[in-house]
Amino acid sequence: MSETELSPERLLGFYRDMLLIRRFEERAAELRMAGLIPGFLHPYIGQEAVAVGVCAALGRDDVITSTHRGHGHMLARGADPRRMYAELYARRDGYNRAKGGSLHMIDTDLGFLGANGIVGGGIPLATGAGLQLKRTGVKAVAVSFFGDGATNEGAFHESLNLASLWTLPVLYVCENNLYGEFTRQDRHQTVKDIAVRAGSYAMPGAIADGNDVLDVYRVARQAVARARAGEGPTLVEAKTYRHRGHYEGDMGAYRPADEVAEWLERDPILTFGVRLVSQHGVGQAALDEVAAEVETTLEEAAAFAEASPHPAPEEALEDVYRETYGGMALR
Amino acid sequence: MRTIAYSAAIREALAEEMERDEQVFLLGEDIGESGGVFGVTKGLLDRFGADRVLDTPISEEVIVGAGVGASLLGGRPVVEIMFSDFATLAMDMIVNQAAKTHYMTGGRLSAPMTIRLVTGTAGATAAQHSQSLEAWFTHTPGLKCVAPSTPADAKALMKAAIRDPDPVCFFEHKLLYNSKGEVPDDIEPLPLGQGRIVREGSDVTVVAYLNTRVEALAAAEALAEEGVSLEVFDPRSLVPFDRDGLRASLEKTGRLLIAHEAPARGGFGAEIAAIAAGECWELLRGPVVRVCGTNTPIPYAPELEGFVIPDAARIAAAARQMVASEAM
C-alpha cells in the first residue's frame, strides 16, 4: 500500500490525532503539577504514531486492551477527551466514574476494554476477547498493546502460544520504547528485535518504524487483514521511544543525553508535519488550524473536567459487585 | 428424585447451563478428550463439541485470562483449575483483573465467569496438590466464593454461579466427587448466601463446609451417644455468608465451633469467629473454638497428612471439651 492511497484529509487526521495525544499528555502533566490530577501519569509522548497508525487500521467492532501508558490508545480510538480528563481529575463524569483513573480507563462503546495497571495484564484479556470474537463469528479482531518490558512476562508467552494454537484474531502490538520502566532493553532481554519471539509460536512477527505513522498503519493493516481472514495472530513490534520518564516525575536520568536528542529529532509529529507539507501538498496553515482546534478541544475538556462534581465518599462502596444479594456480599 | 455423585451433579449443572445459554463454555487442562482429571467434564466434549469444551495448554494465567477476556464481551466461561494450588499461577487474572473489573470501571464492565477450583486434602498428594486456599479469595472484594458439600448443593450452586453476573470461585473437594446424594430432577439455582442446618442440635453449633462437613456430621453422630448434641451448619457459600443463619443457630446453642481444612491462621474460620464475636456476643456462652488445619504445609505421609487435617475425632473432642469445661 502506498501513502498516496490515503487522502490528504485522512493524513491530516492522523496528524491531528497524534497532536491531540501529545497535547493531551502535556496538559495532563501540567494539571498534575498544579495539583489538579491526584494519581499516576505514564505519558505516551513520543509514541503517538503507534496508537494512531494501529487504530487507523481498525474497524468499528474491533476491540483493544491497553496498558499503564494508555491515554494515546484511547484517544486514537476516538475517546472523548472531556471524560478522560474528568476521570484523571477523579470526577463523576469520568469514564470510570472516578473509580479507575489513568490506569483503568475504559470506553466500552469504542471496544476499548481498558488500560491496565499490571504490566502484561491486558495481553491474556485480548486473547480471550479474540476467542470470544471467534466463537461468536464476529469478523473482528482484538488488539493488545504492551511494551518491551511486558514481553518478559509469562502472560505474553502463554497468550501468544494459545492464540497461535487456536488461530485467534489477535494483534499483539509491542511498543518497544527501549526501556522497561527504568531498565534499558539490552539489560532486560537478550533479543534486540522482539518480533523474533513470534517465531517461537509459529506466527508472523513484523517490525514497524514506530515513529512513522504510515509505516505503523501499513504493518497493522496487513496484520488486521490476516486476522480477519481467519489466519490467526501477528506480533507487531513498533520501534519507538518515550520522550519523558516512565511516569511523570521520573526525570529519566538513566538515559544518555545523546540517545534522547537523537530520538527527539525523529519526533513522530514534527517529522510527519514536515512530510505533509513537503510531499502531500498540505499547507502550513492547515497544520496551524489543526493545532488551534486541538487546543480548543483540550481547553474545553479540562473545563468540563473541572466543572464535574466530585464523587461522594460513600460511592466507594458501590460497584464491587453487580449483584450483592441485598448487600450481603459486601459485608 | 435421583441419587447421583457430586461429580455427576456438577457435570449435569454444566451441561444444563450449556443447553440453556450458548454463551456458556468450558476452558481447562485435559477437560475435553480426557474428561478432566476427576472426570467431572466427561462426555461434554462429545455432546457440545470442541467450540464449547476447550482443552487448553498448561497455562493457568492465560486460561483464566482468556476466560476474563471472553466474559468482557458477553461470554460466560467456566474455567477449571485442575488443582486449586495452581491458581497461584493465575492470581493476577483472578485477583487483579476479574475481581476488580466491575469496580475499577465504575460498573461499566464486568467479568461474569465461574472459576472451578479443585481443592482439599486427599490421598497423599502432598504440599502442592492438597491445599485449601479459599481464604485468599474470600479476602478479595469482587469475588464470590461457594463451597458445596452435597450433590444437590453442588448442582444448584453451579447453576447459580454460572448465572451470577460477577466472578464466582467454585470450590470442589476431591474427596466428595464420589459421594452420592439425592438431587431433585428439576433443581433450581440456589441463591448464594443461604446456609443450611444439616443436623439439628442444642449444645454446640459446628460450622463446617466441603469435606469437613462430612467429618462434622460423623462427630455429631458419635457425640449423640454420649448425650452431647451438635448442630451442624453448612454455610455453602462463604461470600456472601449467611450471617442470619449463623445467628439463628447460636440462639439455640450459644456455643460455636468452626472446622475447616485450611490452616487456622487467617483462615475463613477466623472471619466467622469475628462475625460471631462482633454480632452475636450476647449469645455466646464461652470462647469460640476453631478446629482447623495446622499452620503447616500439607505433608506426604498418610499419618502426617491425617495429623494436620481435622477429622471427626478432633471435632468431637473439641466439642466435648466445650460442653464439659462449662459444666465444671
Image (cartoon, rainbow, N blue to C red):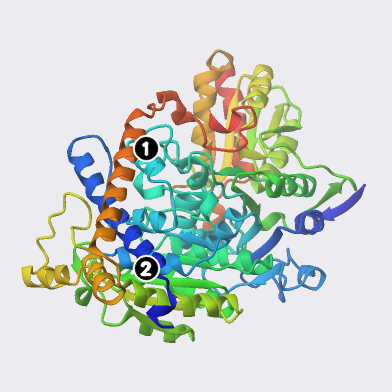
Against A61, is B113 above or below? above
Relative side of A211 to A236, left or right: left
The residue under the point 71% across, 54% down is B176
The type of residue carrying mark 2 is Leu
The residue sitting at 66% across, 46% down in the picture is: B210
Q: Is residue A289 above or below residue B316?
A: below
Q: In this view, does A217 lie above or below B229?
A: below
Q: In this view, does B212 lie to the left or right of A187?
A: right
Q: Hey, which quadrant is residue A231 in on the image?
A: bottom right
Furthest-top residue in view?
B282
Gap in angstroms between the C-alphas marked 2 and 1: 29 Å
Residue named by callout 1: A86
Mark before the other along the chain sequence, 2 or 1: 2
Left/right placement of residue A266 relative to residue A93 reads left
Mark 2 secondary-structure assignment: helix
- Discs 2 and 1 lie in a common subunit: yes
Chain that bears disc 1? A
Residue at position x 47%, y 72% in the image: A171
The numbered dot on residue A11 is: 2
